[in-house]
Amino acid sequence: MVKALLTILIIIGSVILLAYGLGSCRKDNPNNLNMMDQQIPAGFPDPAYRFADNLLSKEGFELGRKLFYDGALSLDGNFPCASCHQQIAAFGTFEHDRSHGYNGSHTLRNAPVLFNLAWQKSFHWDGEFKSLFDEAAQPINGHIEMAESFNGVINKLSKDAAYRKEFKNVFRSEFIRPEFILKALAQFTGNMVSANSKYDRYKKGQVSYSVQELNGYQIFKANCATCHPEPMFTDYSFRNIGLPVDNFLNDYGRMRVTKDKSDSLKFKVPTLRNVYISSNYMHDGRFNTLAQCINHYRTGIQQSVTLDPLLTGGIALTNSQAADLSLFLRTLTDSSFLVDPGFKKP
């Protein structure tokens, strides 16, 4: 009898727990959204951003994708996020030094690539913004970028019945708000993950490197890996790599944000993933080719007070070593990411 009573109690307890669990799900997800797990590739470190304040769903991701490609986020309709961040260039600007913006303007800097953003703690070349929300708000409101206001964007989106329905479904509100726009964009851009290059397959033992690629890999590890460590191929630090100041742009990098002279000419170390197809290069897009970038480190470094100590003497490479290094860098190209239909214009 005692055994039967225990069995009944266990069943009752299970039913209560199940009901509580289902109630919690309904509470957190009243619209029965298709929840998504954050993508964290094997071998990657823990992301800096885990979407704790932005419940991931397929519907939210798709809403963000739709917004990313929609010119309504710009004042004249001609400059969606995708105008500066193109999939063919790993969501950087394809073969362009600095992006075009509203009214024929040019942006100050080369558009950074958009992938693996959840691992970053700061955004833009000078680290001015600390979240995916803030970094997306700036170009929407920037007068030389998209030149809109959130009031203007919301007025346009609110006239679209499909948008009203989608925002209500994802964010449970009758009204479209700036934070909902930014959260949807963050769900999309924050889930752009690139981790399927030849390098990744090589590390898994699925492919082999050529002799030149393997030589380039060794050269990379000996000369570049301090600032561009695997597997992210950036340490997310800010460094002066000896680029002469462009006298037209007068861009002194992180000092613009911190007002600290010790940060003069320091810019964020970019990831080298997909670097072969994300030209132009450097913060102002001054270099067209990887060869030009490598040659800068060989012979072009300008000495200054804030120059990174690792680059005081430059990087000595023979022509053959430079060629092998370039071939290794090509193996960081994730071709599947460049054509993934899930990131294309809906």
Image: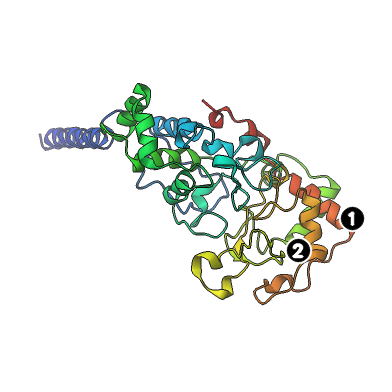
Seen from the viewer's position, the closer of residues 178 and 232 is 178
Q: Residue at x 34, y 29 (%)?
A: 158
Seen from the viewer's position, the closer of residues 325 and 166 is 166
Query: In this figure, which residue is indicated by the disc labeled 2?
Result: 222
Query: In this figure, which residue is indicated by the disc labeled 1?
Result: 320
Q: Quadrant of residue 223?
A: bottom right
Q: Position of residue 257 (x, y in %)?
A: 50, 65
Quarter of the image for the N terminus: give it.
top left
Q: Position of residue 316 (x, y in %)?
A: 83, 66
Residue at the outermost front position = 103
Q: Disc 2 or 1, which lies upstream in sequence?
A: 2
Residue 34 visible in the shown view: no
Residue at the outermost bottom position = 305
Q: Quadrant of residue 58?
A: top left
Asked if residue 45 is positioned above or below residue 77 in the image, the reply reads: below
- In the image, taking residue 148 as reference, residue 11 lies left or right, namely left
Q: Position of residue 160 (x, y in %)?
A: 37, 24
Q: Residue at x 36, y 47 (%)?
A: 52
